[in-house]
Image (cartoon, grey):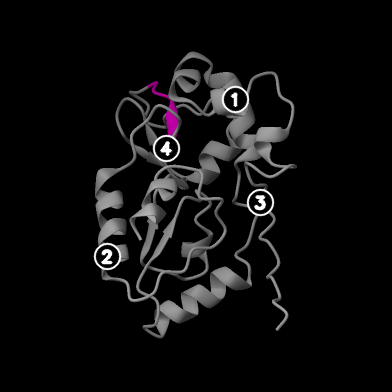
Amino acid sequence: MELEFPQKAGIPDFRSKDGLYNQKYNYNPEEILSHTFFINHPKEFFEFYKEKMNSLKYEPNITHKKLALLEKKGKLKAIITQNIDSLHSKAGSENVYELHGSVLRNYCTKCKRVHSAEYVFESDGVPICQNKRCDGIVKPDVVLYEEMLNEDVIEKAVRAIERADLLIVAGTSLTVYPASRSYKLF
């Protein structure tokens, strides 16, 4: 039986030979995507982030859509993803646990006001809070290196895995925490 692999959504990955981590930049991508770099070099962080992490221009592929259909039919209970592109939600899936956050959610580091992804990606330079009484930097709600994962999301994902009759693991190298640790539980 020959397996046919669906077309990719087109978003560059991180670890393949052509992935973001194997391209040349002024700084190492793992350094750029760290909390310390975000704080100390926000201009350079957002230059990289806006150029390389903008998933707004991408559409879900057939796999995202089929998974959403399986959920609607009651055959799929949850999707657990390390991706930050929100393509599963865009395809119609509702029970999605985004372990590393999402580019769609953004908040002011001072007043916590929520800002759209469009505002962040279309802003000139470093996005500043739209609240007139605040000058905070707007941070994407993505987990950067040196940051903790959202415990509530982790707990819900673990519960979904514990209740699963069948677990499908796809599209991961299983080298990034927490997926790298979780698969060893089975």
Mark sitting earlier along the chain (4/2): 4
The image quadrant where one finds the N terminus is: bottom right
The alpha-carbon separation of the residues under discs 4 and 3 comes to: 18 Å
Assign a secondary structure to mark 4: loop
Question: Which label lies toward us, 1 or 2?
Answer: 2
Mark sitting earlier along the chain (1/3): 3
Q: Is residue 86 left or right of residue 7?
A: left
Mark sitting earlier along the chain (4/1): 1
The image quadrant where one finds the C terminus is: bottom left
Assign a secondary structure to mark 1: loop
Quadrant of the rendered image containing residue 110 = top left
* Residue linked to disc 2: 162
Question: Which label lies toward us, 4 or 1?
Answer: 4
The alpha-carbon separation of the residues under discs 1 and 2 comes to: 44 Å
Quadrant of the rendered image containing residue 106 = top left
Q: Amino acid at mark 3?
A: Ile
Query: Are the residues at dot 1 and dot 2 in contact (C-beta closer than 8 Å)?
Result: no
Query: Are the residues at dot 4 and dot 2 in contact (C-beta closer than 8 Å)?
Result: no
Quadrant of the rendered image containing residue 64 = bottom right
Q: Amino acid at mark 2?
A: Glu
Q: Residue at x 35, y 73 (%)?
A: 77
Numbered label attached to residue 11:
3
Q: Residue at x 48, y 25 (%)?
A: 34
Q: Residue at x 54, y 63 (%)?
A: 170
In the image, residue 185 sits, relative to residue 64, either above or below, namely: above
Range drawn in magenta: 135-142
Numbered label attached to residue 125:
1
In the image, residue 145 sits, relative to residue 169, either above or below, namely: above
The alpha-carbon separation of the residues under discs 4 and 1 comes to: 21 Å
